[in-house]
Amino acid sequence: MDVMDGRFVPNITFGPGMVKSLRPCTQQPLDVHLMITQPQQYIRPFAEAGADWLSFHLEAEGNPAKTIAMIHSMGIKAGLAINPETPAETVFPYLSMADMVLIMSVNPGFGGQAFHVSVLDKVRVLHEKAPQIPIEIDGGINCKNIALAAHAGVDIFVAGSAIVGQPDYAAAVSALRNAAKTN
């Protein structure tokens, strides 16, 4: 679930209330992507609402180690997110603390953008540096590029427009899964 504050990215979306509303509807983990400034202020509200994962942007946080510790103190998993132009090396100091790395493959804040294939180099670098850390990719994922991302080392795919824009969600998810297996 993407959370945007209108400052870190130009759009505004959901808050903890949406997570709280969704929590009783699924046993699946709720992965919350904080595209917001000052993410530390929102850790407790999202954790208490039922988030299982909280990812925050290194570009938005001055003290990533403290933010990761705060997320873990709430009993949930912490993800580090980086924008397409941010070097992979910026997450290296925090890899031993993080539960996941989320790489944006589009500029954050808007759906339906084209996939930046250049981020796959970042995926490879991070996968080589810390193969035990799951890598999530978000933005522009579709049946044409998902196998490339999987081959590069991506473990988790956010494919909003490739699913939501289709008449049959289950068929779209199945097509993506099959395409990812062709790596």
Image (tube, rainbow, N blue to C red):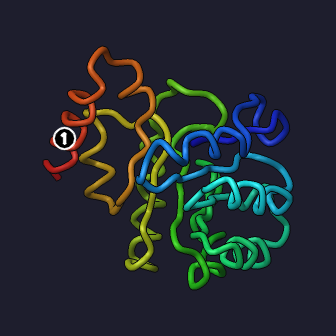
The spot of residue 55 in percent (x, y) is: 62, 58
Identify the image quadrant of the N terminus: top right
Amino acid type of the residue tagged 1 in the rendering: Ala
Residue sticking out furthest to the top: 167
- SS of the residue at dot 1? helix
The spot of residue 9 in percent (x, y) is: 76, 36
Q: Residues within 10 Å of mark 1 (few under 14, many from 20)?
A: some
The residue at the point 39 percent across, 37 percent down is 141
Which residue is label 1 attached to?
179
The spot of residue 121 in percent (x, y) is: 43, 58
- Examine the image and state in which quarter residue 38 appears: bottom right
The spot of residue 27 in percent (x, y) is: 42, 53
- Relative to 50, residue 93 above or below: below
The residue at the point 19 percent across, 33 percent down is 175
- Relative to 122, residue 19 above or below: above
The residue at the point 25 percent across, 38 percent down is 176
Please name whichever residue, 96 or 117, is drawn nearer the observer in this view of the structure: 96
Residue sticking out furthest to the bottom: 96
Q: Please indicate whether residue 127 sits to the left or right of residue 96 in the image.
A: left
Please name whichever residue, 66 or 24, is drawn nearer the observer in this view of the structure: 24
